[in-house]
Image: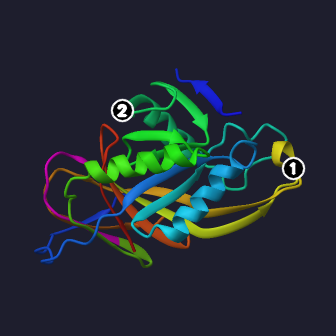
């Protein structure tokens, strides 16, 4: 069944040089909120693996939440940051499968604006298509990986937060307890950590910040109302 709850180090700013002539292609962001302890999540996890493999225009991310860790198995990737992120979406998301103010797994959120039950292929693809059609030119955004991360953002309207996301491309997990006990589950783009690089006030900037854990790195420019204004991968 789909699980639902009713909600109740400073970065270094650097003068931004002129942006390159070409704005990099902006991926659509699809975030899956999932858990190894949720028996309705494996089909959604498998769909995310497929999207990560076959849809290069998407940046898919798997956020493992903590609130099912008491069901006989503790998710090895669960993060309180992921749970908090999902709770914020419950307060801001515009188009929700279950209405405002609710949390459930598996929940897939596209561009921070609409969601779908993550195991419902038709609904997931429809949400992606709707956001692709509604997409507006994004703010120019780059991220460079290294011992520290370097993020460069262009000018634009509005304000937001530059969020660094560290993730691992693939994991296979043998689950030994709980609702999925005895199964081996495959995950794509598992989020291992997040860190705020800087606030963005609509002006071009370049910032260096400590990178979060994870084999790969992405950056999201997200407005205070949850909309993802731009995204980039290292």
Q: Earlier in the sequence, mark 2 or mark 1?
A: 2
**Closest to the observer: 35 or 200?**
35
Left or right of 68? Residue 60 is: left
Q: Residue at x 13, y 49 (%)?
A: 157
Q: Secondary structure at mark 2?
A: loop
Q: Is residue 152 magenta?
A: yes
Residue 189 can be seen, yes or no: no
Q: Circle 2 is placed at which residue position?
A: 94
Q: Quadrant of the C terminus?
A: bottom left
Residue 185 can be seen, yes or no: yes
Q: Tell me the distance, in whole angstroms, between the alpha carbons under discs 2 and 1.
A: 35 Å
**Closest to the observer: 124 or 205?**
124
Q: Which segment is the magenta one?
A: 150-160
- In percent of width and height, residue 198 lies at 30, 56
Q: Circle 1 is placed at which residue position?
A: 181
Q: Quadrant of residue 127 in the image?
A: top left
Q: Residue at x 46, y 53 (%)?
A: 30
Relative to 67, residue 125 above or below:
below
**Closest to the observer: 38 or 133?**
133
């Amino acid at each position: 069944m789909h699980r639902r709850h009713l909600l109740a180090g400073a970065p270094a700013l650097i003068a931004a040089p002129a942006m390159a002539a070409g704005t990099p292609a902006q991926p659509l962001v699809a975030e899956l909120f999932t858990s190894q302890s949720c028996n309705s999540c494996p089909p959604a996890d498998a769909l995310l693996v497929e999207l990560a493999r076959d849809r290069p225009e998407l940046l898919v991310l798997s956020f493992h939440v903590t609130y099912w860790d008491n069901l006989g198995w503790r998710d090895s990737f669960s993060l309180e940051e992921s749970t908090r992120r999902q709770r914020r979406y419950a307060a801001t998301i515009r188009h929700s499968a279950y209405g405002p103010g609710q949390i459930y797994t598996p929940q897939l959120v596209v561009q921070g604006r609409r969601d779908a039950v993550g195991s419902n292929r038709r609904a997931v693809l429809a949400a992606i298509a709707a956001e692709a059609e509604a997409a507006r030119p994004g703010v120019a955004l780059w991220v460079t990986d290294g011992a520290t991360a370097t993020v460069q953002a262009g000018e634009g309207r509005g304000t937001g937060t530059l969020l660094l996301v560290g993730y691992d491309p693939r994991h296979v997990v043998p689950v030994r307890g709980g609702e999925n006990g005895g199964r081996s589950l495959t995950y794509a783009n598992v989020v291992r950590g997040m860190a705020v690089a800087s606030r963005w006030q609509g002006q071009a900037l370049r910032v260096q910040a400590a990178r979060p854990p994870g084999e790969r790195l992405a950056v999201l420019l997200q407005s205070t109302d949850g909309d993802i204004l731009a995204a980039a991968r290292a």
